[in-house]
Amino acid sequence: MKIIDVPQGSQEWLAARAGIPSASKFDNIIDTSGQPSKQRKRYLYQLAGERITRKSEETYQNAAMLRGKELEAEARSFYELTNGVTVEQVGFCLADGGYGASPDGLVGTDGGLEVKCPLIYTHVGYLLSGTMPTDYILQVQGALLVTGRKWWDFCSYFPGLTPLVVRVLPDAKLQKKLAVELELFCRELSEISEKIRG
């Protein structure tokens, strides 16, 4: 794995990940059962276009998403304080297979961190379930696959409420399916990119 150490959200970061499948979008390739996602073709075409233009397509961000980004640093600090650890912020982690992940942090030599700062009703729902939301299974398993880390902490944070921290271990069965699908996806992405490049 190679770490491209640029600030997340910067123009350098956008350029570094342009045209590369990223863990936050692995659910656009397969679902948690290992079946192809209905979004697969659209994501494939988007990345092919990005490879040619070398520009990452801007994605829509609503007020709740922007608020979550603003709270991420506070959540990371809270996690560091309550766990007695230092979270290393990195830019983009690129796996040998041509796909990557942008972790919210790396913890020591073994761990990683995914932070979500949802709206209050969503956070309360997460607290009641006490488990990592299924919406983020592929993102977290993908980050584990990309980085080769032994564990990943999922942290949902809302100021004034108890945070939810769930430690996630690699799911060998899901990761095997994901690795196969990523290899096929990356091969098809290269073929399409070459075809439209002329």
Image: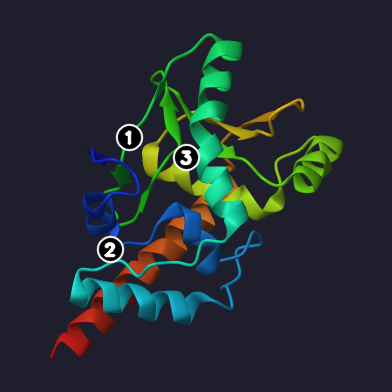
Q: Which mark is residue 90?
A: 1
Q: Which mark is residue 144?
A: 3
- Secondary element at tag 3: helix
Mark 1, mark 3: which one is toward the viewer? Answer: 1
Label 3 vs 2, first from the N-terminus: 2
Identity, as a three-letter code, of the amino acid under mark 3: Leu
Q: Are marks 1 and 2 in contact (CB under 8 Å)?
A: no
Q: Is residue 163 depicted above or below 49 in this figure?
A: above
- Secondary element at tag 2: loop
* Crowd tier of the residue under label 1, counting other residues whose Cα lies within 10 Å: few below 14, some 14–19, many 20 or above: some
The N terminus - image quarter: top left
Q: Which mark is residue 18?
A: 2
Direction top: furthest residue: 84
Q: Is residue 111 depicted above or below 168 in this figure?
A: above
Give how far apart the Cα atoms at labels 1 and 3 are: 15 Å
Identity, as a three-letter code, of the amino acid under mark 1: Val
Q: Nearer the viewer, residue 8 or 138?
A: 8
Q: Residue at x 55, y 36 (%)?
A: 71
- Secondary element at tag 1: loop
Q: Nearer the viewer, residue 141 or 116?
A: 116
